[in-house]
Image (tube, grey):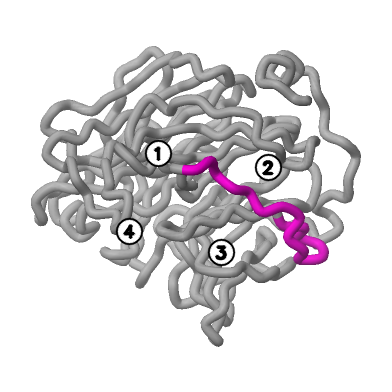
Amino acid sequence: MTTRRTFLASLLAASAAPATGWAAVGDPTYLAAAKQGDGSFVLVGLREGGEEAFRVPLPARGHAACAHPTRAEAVGFARRPGTYALVIDCISGEVLHELSAPQGHSFNGHGAFSADGTVLFTSEQVAEGSAGRVGIWDVEAGYTRVSDFPTHGLGPHELRLMPDGQSLVIANGGIQTDAFDRTKLNTDTMQPNLSYVGFDGTLLEKVELEPELHENSIRHLALRPDGLVGFCMQWQGEEGAATPLLGLHRRGEAPVLCEAPLGDELVMQGYAGSVAFAGEGREIAITSPRGGRMHRFSETGAFLGAVSRTDVCGLATHEGGYMASDGLGGLILVKGETPTPLRRADVAWDNHLVRIAG
């Protein structure tokens, strides 16, 4: 029987079993959830140019997915308050495993594989109190639940594997929600944070915002290979506040908040839905479907400009800059201030474009 002790001891030395790789489904670069015209939901693989590589069904609206590093296998997560987390064979469309969070836990829309693909980490929270947990799943044992550890905050959302391959960075949104209807219970006292955590649950570093920004919920993450983390936020306070929605952080240093000019900040309506570094890594951007805007910043936090696009949200690194998606089925390449339409699909893209490692 797999135990947490033996599992963690072998984690870094283990290697994924040989399996059919992503080439079998056309070498996609991205994964994205979407809604089809008939009201059904799918997970789609997209190539660098926006061409569709595959399309497999989902049982309900999806939020984000994570891709196995070597085989054509993805874990699709439901958009909250949905509860599913499905391991999907992207070649056949077959659901290989349906993951079940422990009683009293719920999945929070995101997950990440270890570098060798032997472990899946899932973002979860406890229903009563919204304490964050990271679920640990043994992939080679058929996605067996091994254990979990704390995220060191409330209401976690996205988590990412750090470039060292031995730790995670976690966006703890700080929001406590009602276990039944997701009413926000603590916006006056919430404390979002960015936590760096070892695979055994050890807290390596925690970053909190200044007190006046305690209602800025940290939600989504971008990573540069040198360890620079971008985090985007969603304001939970009084409407009309032009708070910064993007931060940059490197371990051991203070966070840098990236501010747009007042008019541009107001257009975002306090909401950043996705974040990504550009292909060369020297700039970073966030999107707001509420504002229909994408904001670009330098790697040091200086505002570089805005791109207008109705209902834009999905955003990912592209060799030529960024790939972005919108709720009208559009896919665009953004390089500098110039958006170039790639194609329009017969779907409504959901919040995220997830780049497949490799």
Q: Dot 2 surroundings within 10 Å: few (below 14), some, or many (20 or more)?
A: few
Q: Position of residue 221 (x, y in %)?
A: 44, 39
Which residue is denoted by mark 1 in the rendering? Answer: 126
Crowding near the residue tagged with mark 1, few <14, some 14–19, many ≥20 C-alpha atoms within 10 Å: many
Query: Which numbered disc flags the more N-terminal residue, 2 or 4?
Result: 4
Disc nearest the viewer among 4 and 3: 3
308 with respect to 82 (left or right): left
Work out whether mark 3 precedes mark 2 in sequence or the reverse, and give the earlier one.
3
Residue 89 in magenta stretch: yes
Quarter of the image for residue 183 reads bottom left
Percent coordinates x, y for residue 297 in the rendering: 35, 42
Marks 1 and 2, the one that precedes in the sequence: 1
According to the picture, the residue beneath numbered tag 4 turns out to be 288
Residue type highlighted by circle 1: Val
Query: Residue beneath label 3, please?
Result: 33
Q: Could you say which is closer to the camera, residue 333 or residue 16?
A: 16
- Label 3 and label 1: CA atoms lie apart by 25 Å
Decide: few, some or many residues near mark 3? Use Cα within 10 Å; few <14, some 14-19, many ≥20.
many
274 sits left or right of 358 in the view: left
Q: Nearer the viewer, residue 128 or 220?
A: 128
Secondary structure beneath disc 3? strand
Report the residue at 78% width, 52% height from top: 72
Query: Mark 2 and mark 4: span between their CA atoms?
Result: 25 Å
Magenta stretch, main secondary structure, is loop
Question: Is residue 353 something that shows in the picture?
Answer: no
